[in-house]
Image (cartoon, rainbow, N blue to C red):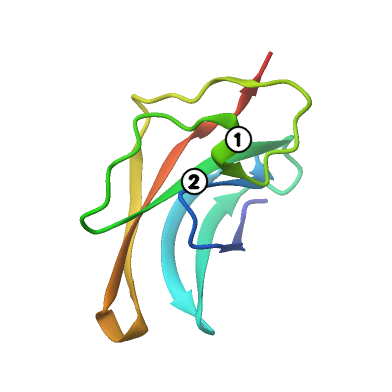
């Protein structure tokens, strides 16, 4: 049975979020002074790492995620592909009373060769 799970996000360029494969990323909002990602998941599915990008308004848009820039990546092999054509916008959120605006993207599930 599918469920909606919540995952905390840090405000960094790239980060890994471990979640069930083929999760549907629903939204990102501020809750308790932090960014939270909600996803519809099948809890029993195989767990995978997904790369989430957070881009501030006016900042450069990432074309790819270099392994050393992905917070939380713990693989022993380099990331060989982060699907640059799969940049799915999840949400735009405001923090600090609207002074900072963040655009959150799902880059891809991480493939490790």
Q: Is residue 55 above or below residue 44?
A: below
Residue mark closest to the camera, 1 vs 2: 1
Observer-nearest of 88 and 26: 88
Q: Is residue 111 above or below residue 63?
A: above
Of 86 and 75, the residue lying toward us? 75
Q: What residue does disc 2 label?
A: 52
Q: Position of residue 91 (x, y in %)?
A: 33, 58
Q: With 100 as the anchor, is 109 left or right in this view?
A: right
Numbered mark located on residue 68 in the image: 1
* Marking on residue 56: none
Is 92 situated above or below 32?
A: above
Query: x and y percent of residue 111 in the render?
Result: 62, 22
Instruction: Tell me the SS state at disc 2.
Output: strand
Asked if disc 1 and disc 2 are in contact, CB closer than 8 Å, the reply is: no
Give the side of residue 85 with respect to residue 26, left or right: left
The percent position of residue 101, horizontal first and vertical second, equals: 28, 68
Dividing the picture into quadrants, the one containing residue 3 is bottom right
- Taking the view exactly as shown, the residue that stands out farthest to the left is 58
* Residue for point 33% across, 68% down: 93
Residue sitting at x 69%, y 13% = 113
Does residue 64 appear to the left or right of 78 in the view shown?
A: left
Check disc 1: other Cα within 10 Å, few if <14, some if 14-19, many if 20+. few
Alpha-carbon span between mark 1 and mark 2 = 14 Å
**Mark 2: few/some/many CA within 10 Å (<14, 14-19, 20+):** many
Number of numbered discs visible in the structure rendering: 2
Which tag, 1 or 2, sits closer to the chain's start?
2
**Residue, x 44% and y 24% (percent of image)?**
83
Examine the rendered structure and indicate whether residue 35 appears above or below residue 81.
below
Could you say where residue 28 lies in the image, as x and y percent from the top left?
A: 43, 63
- Residue at point 63%, 36% (across, down): 21
Q: Mark 1: which secondary structure?
A: helix
């Amino acid at each position: 049975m599918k469920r909606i799970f919540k995952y905390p996000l840090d405000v960094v360029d790239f980060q890994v979020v471990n979640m069930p494969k083929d999760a549907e990323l629903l939204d990102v909002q501020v809750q308790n002074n932090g960014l939270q990602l909600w996803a519809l998941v099948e809890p029993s599915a195989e767990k995978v790492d997904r790369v989430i990008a957070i881009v501030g308004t006016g900042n450069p848009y990432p074309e790819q995620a270099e392994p050393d820039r992905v917070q939380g990546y713990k693989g022993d092999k380099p990331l060989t592909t982060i699907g640059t054509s799969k940049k799915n916008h999840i949400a735009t959120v405001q923090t600090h009373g609207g002074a900072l605006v963040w655009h959150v993207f799902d880059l891809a599930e991480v493939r490790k060769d």
